[in-house]
Amino acid sequence: MTTTEPAIIAGSDVLIVIDVQNDFCPSGALPVPRGDEIVPIINRLATRFCHIVLTQDWHPAGHFSFASSHPGKKPFETIAAPYGLQVLWPDHCVQGTSGAAFHPALDVRHAALILRKGMDRAIDSYSAFYENDRTTPTGLTGYLRTRGLSRVFLAGLALDFCVRYSAEDAAREGFTVFVFDDACRGIDVDGSIAATRTSFAALGVNCRTAAALV
Ligand SMILES: [Zn+2]
């Protein structure tokens, strides 16, 4: 449930901005509807945090998650991967391309860490904490722990995939987790937004509005 109750931001809080990249915005290869609307909201939010991490989906060409890597398959179909069901996507966020770059209006210059994910050609990575095999860590938990950061606030794209998986993993890792609802946009593949809401409630992921904070 989303509440407008403002969260008081402390020095042990971190804002993790998930995948605000050109390919996930309306003119990109895998557009999240109205994905660009969150950029000014995140820019304002970021001024409230001392600690910020940006994530970047960062695939090699021919990545396993691309429908084009599987003859006869189309985007948004699924395939059985060794680690479970994998949604197939249009080619997106290929390393070094303009599509993989951050949205040009994203202005979070005091972010300490840019964490890239999805670089293993054979494994997708929605979460900022674990690749989709659910066992390969990105190292983010260690980074946050060693810096004494205990509350994780999330914003970005897409709510029902990379934000969702990141929030779930953060909660499982023992962090207190907040998602800024109005600073996220979703894709909604086969009811994935409703499933996200159910999962957040089950795991105790708190939803807030950025508007109440800034
Ligand atoms: Zn991807």
Image: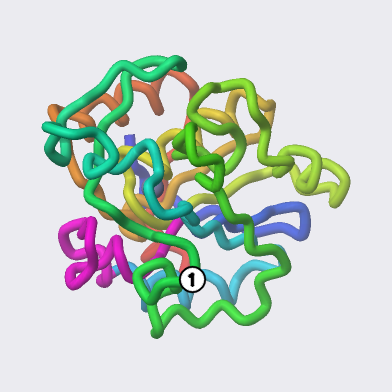
Q: Nearer the viewer, residue 13 or 188?
A: 188
Q: Nearer the viewer, residue 176 or 7?
A: 176
Q: Is residue 168 above or below residue 112?
A: above
Q: Which residue is labeled 1 in the image?
A: 96
Residue at the image point whose x is 28% and y is 53% from the top: 91
Q: Can residue 133 be seen here?
A: yes
Which quarter of the figure has residue 172?
top right
Q: Can residue 18 be seen here?
A: no
Looking at the rendered image, the quarter that the N terminus falls into is top left
Instruction: Give the image location of residue 48, x and y in percent.
Output: 60, 71
Residue found at the far front of this picture: 71
Residue at the image point whose x is 32% and y is 18% from the top: 85
Q: Is residue 53 left or right of residue 196?
A: right
Residue at the image point whose x is 67% and y is 27% from the top: 173
Q: Is residue 10 left or right of residue 116?
A: right
Q: Main secondary structure of the magenta part?
A: loop
The amino acid type found where label 1 is placed reads Gly
- How is colour applied across the structure in the image? rainbow
Read off the magenta span.
18-37
Magenta-span inclusion, residue 28? yes
What SS does tag 1 mark? loop
Q: Nearer the viewer, residue 25 or 184?
A: 25
Q: Is residue 148 above or below residue 80?
A: below
Instruction: Give the image location of residue 58, x and y in percent.
Output: 49, 56
Instruction: Give the image location of residue 191, x and y in percent.
Output: 15, 28
Magenta-span inclusion, residue 31? yes
- Judge: label 1 CB < 8 Å from ligand 1: no
Q: Is residue 184 left or right of residue 47?
A: left
